[in-house]
Amino acid sequence: MHDDDYGRIEIDIKHVNYVRLLRATISEAYIGIVSGFNNTPKVDLLLPHVPSMLELAQRCQADSEWTGGTVKLTIHVLNGVADASSTTRSSNSACWNG
C-alpha cells in the first residue's frame, strides 16, 4: 500500500458514512411525510413516490453494515407506506392495487 492509498481510504470511509447518514435522514423525512398524509383525503399524492421509498429501503438493506437505527427507520417507512396503502384501498382507490 502506498502513502496515497491511506488518504483515499479515509476519504472513502467518510463518503460511505456520509451516504449512510443521508439514507437515515431521508428515511426520517419519508416517515414524517407519510405520517402527515395518512388518514387524509390527499393520501393518494404519495403514490408516485412509493417506488423511491421502496428503493431506499432496498438500498439500506443491501448495505452489509447497516445499523439498527437504519433498520428501524426503514421498517417505519415501510409501515407508513403499508398504512397509506390500506387507507387508500379502503376508500376504493384502484391506483394502489397495481
Image: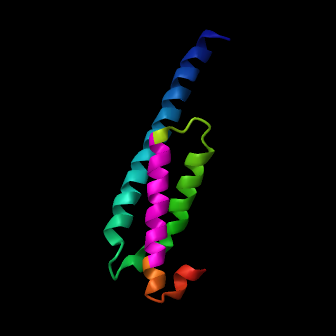
Say which quadrant the C terminus sits in.
bottom right
Is residue 11 found left or right of 44 in the rendered image?
right
Say which quadrant the N terminus sits in.
top right
**Residue that extends furthest to the right in the rendered view of this protein:** 1
Is residue 75 found left or right of 28 in the rendered image?
right
**Residue that extends furthest to the bottom in the rendered view of this protein:** 92
Quick one: 24 or 87, which is closer to the camera?
87
Q: In the image, residue 16 lies at what x, y percent?
A: 53, 34
**Residue 2 lies in quadrant:** top right
**For residue 41, above or below residue 35:** below
* Residue located 48% across and 29% down the image: 14
**For residue 86, above or below residue 49:** below
Magenta segment includes 64: no
For the record, the magenta segment spans: 69-86
**Residue 91 lies in quadrant:** bottom left
Quick one: 19 or 62, which is closer to the camera?
62
* Residue located 51% across and 33% down the image: 15
Q: In the image, residue 57 lies at what x, y percent?
A: 54, 54
Quick one: 49 or 64, which is closer to the camera?
64
* Residue located 34% across and 83% down the image: 41
* Residue located 43% across and 45% down the image: 24
Magenta segment includes 71: yes
**For residue 17, above or below residue 40:** above
Q: How many numbered dots are placed on residues in this image?
A: 0
Q: In the image, residue 72 lies at what x, y percent?
A: 46, 48
